[in-house]
Image: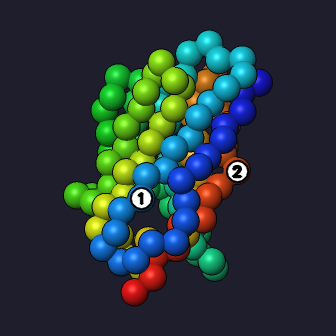
Amino acid sequence: QVQLVESGGGLVQAGGSLRLSCAASGNIFSIGAMYWYRQAPGKQRELVASITSGGSTNYADSVKGRFTISRDNAKNTVYLQMNSLKPEDTAVYYCKVVERKIYWGQGTQVTVSS
């Protein structure tokens, strides 16, 4: 089994930056793709960014140019660097990894004030 631990959430002002991290541990053989999702109150969970094992990335249109997803395979960790934050980015952020099976992190709250 694989466990995911998220960190880095908090309260920031509009225009500020924040970096989220998600570290995987346990019975890891080979991690494939890694993802970041977010869910605001009363709204559906949406895919924010993804990164393949080879490093190819994709982003939601709403965050493209502001957010950057990256990974450190030696540490089994995925990051989400968030710049130029807007109040609309306020949500609970979840990481997801694929290691033969799908695993989810516990979620971390990001709040952006105006």
Q: Amino acid at mark 1?
A: Leu
Q: Which residue does the image show at 58% across and 30% down from the upper left?
A: 98
Residue 17 in the image: state x and y as whole percent. 36, 62
Q: Amino acid at mark 2?
A: Gln
Badge 2 vs badge 1, beta-carbon distance below 8 Å: no
Mark 1 Cα-neighbour bin, 10 Å: few <14, some 14–19, many ≥20: some
Quarter location, residue 28: top right
From the viewer's side, name the closer residue of 90 and 18. Answer: 18
From the viewer's side, name the closer residue of 44 and 28. Answer: 28
Task: Find disc 2 in the rendering and name its residue.
Answer: 106
Residue 74 in the image: state x and y as whole percent. 48, 18
Between tags 2 and 1, which lies in front? 1
Residue 18, disc: 1
Mark 2 Cα-neighbour bin, 10 Å: few <14, some 14–19, many ≥20: some
Q: Quadrant of the N terminus?
A: top right
Give the mark count. 2
Q: Which residue does the image show at 51% across and 32% down from the upper left?
A: 77
Callout 1 secondary element:
strand
Q: Which residue does the image show at 62% across and 58% down from the upper left?
A: 108
Q: Which residue does the image show at 22% across and 58% down from the upper left?
A: 65
Residue 66 makes an appearance in the image: yes
Residue 62 makes an appearance in the image: no
19 left or right of 10? left
Residue 22 in the image: state x and y as whole percent. 56, 41
From the viewer's side, name the closer residue of 17 and 90. Answer: 17
Callout 2 secondary element:
loop
Compared with 64, 13 (above or below) is below
Q: Quadrant of the C terminus?
A: bottom left
Residue 24 in the image: state x and y as whole percent. 62, 30
Compared with 99, 35 (above or below) is below
Question: Gap between marks 2 and 1, in whole Å?
Answer: 18 Å
Compared with 78, 25 (above or below) is above
